[in-house]
Amino acid sequence: MTTSLLIGNPNTGKTSLFNALTTSYAYVGNWTGVTVDKKVGQLKNKLGQLVDLPGVYDLRPVSADESVVSNALLQDSFDQFVNIVDASQLERNFQLTLQLLEYNKPIVIALNMMDVAQKRGITIDFDALANRLNVPIYQLVARKETGKEALLEGMRMTKQSPNFQLNYPSEIETTIEALIPYFTEKKEWNARWLAIQFLYGNITVETYLREHEKYASILALREKLQTMLSEPIAAVIFKTREKYIQELMKEISVVNEDNKT
Ligand code: GDP
Ligand code: MG
Ligand code: K
């Protein structure tokens, strides 16, 4: 059975979409270590199951509840991501999207709040966006359940990983290259994602890696990298993503004041 993880920023319409895509759902206890309910729904079209996750702006958790998302990526078995994105707030939402792309599992983007984007005069070049990120994009108004059939079909069809790679400054890339050999024993991990999240200071990833027999060497690589940079590693990583997103936005989105309604 196919398992899809529903991930997105808070208030993007996650619950609305979850309800639109599923016929029934159950609370199957709590996520490990926290009180957040674990909610799993049966997808329409007998497609498999959809797992609801807490809304987060970033994979680096800022609370125990948010650690649920990184823990799911580290420890749970799943087949694809459904990344719900607020079409009227693309820039902010894409910080999370890039981190999901780096995980390199099959992923579909559900571009929700299309009605809000339209009202604000936002025009998006969907083909350019899909091409740049190498993922299928589906437009939705989850509150009205508009677009859900195409999304379900897209989820069924999507078996390819995006093979998307964002390139960081050379000192960071060199350290990523040095870290990757430590992470090859676990096949289901994306070693590059793990290296990036560790360097980014994702505490859930760090806690997980503390069990690694070579943790001292892993940590030393991060400390060495920090001495080579004039800013915190996390800031450099964040800004690299931000720069990429700004360039992407120029290419795919325009706000037309005349089109505002
Ligand atoms: P969550 O916090 O991500 O789970 O989002 P919810 O599903 O609770 O939605 C947050 C708010 O946005 C609710 O008031 C929804 O009715 C509304 N909403 C959800 N999807 C859409 C949409 O596509 N368009 C508009 N205009 N509102 C939406
Ligand atoms: Mg919700
Ligand atoms: K628990």
Image: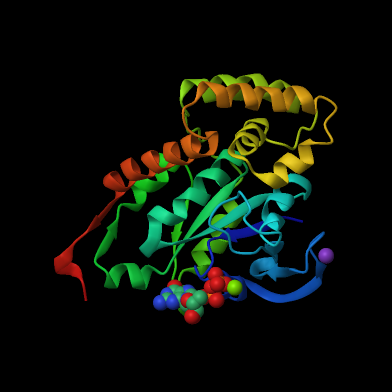
Q: Quadrant of the C terminus?
A: bottom left
Q: Residue drawn 47% across and 41% down? A: 238
How are the residues colored? rainbow
Q: Where 211 sits versus 58, above or below? A: above
Q: Position of residue 80 (x, y in %)?
A: 64, 50
Tell me the quarter of the picture where residue 51 sits.
Answer: bottom right
Q: Where 127 sits versus 244, above or below? A: below
Q: Position of residue 245 (x, y in %)?
A: 38, 44
Q: With 204 as the anchor, is 61 left or right in this view?
A: left
- Which one is nearer the viewer's eye here, 219 or 9? 219
Tell me the quarter of the picture where residue 29 sits.
Answer: bottom right
Q: With 259 as the anchor, is 146 left or right in this view?
A: right
Q: Quadrant of the N terminus?
A: bottom right
Q: Position of residue 47 (x, y in %)?
A: 68, 62
Q: Position of residue 231 (x, y in %)?
A: 47, 32
Q: Residue drawn 75% across and 22% down? A: 217
Q: Residue drawn 71% across and 59% down? A: 64
Task: Answer whether residue 221 is visible to the viewer in this image.
Answer: yes
Task: Answer whether residue 145 is visible to the viewer in this image.
Answer: no
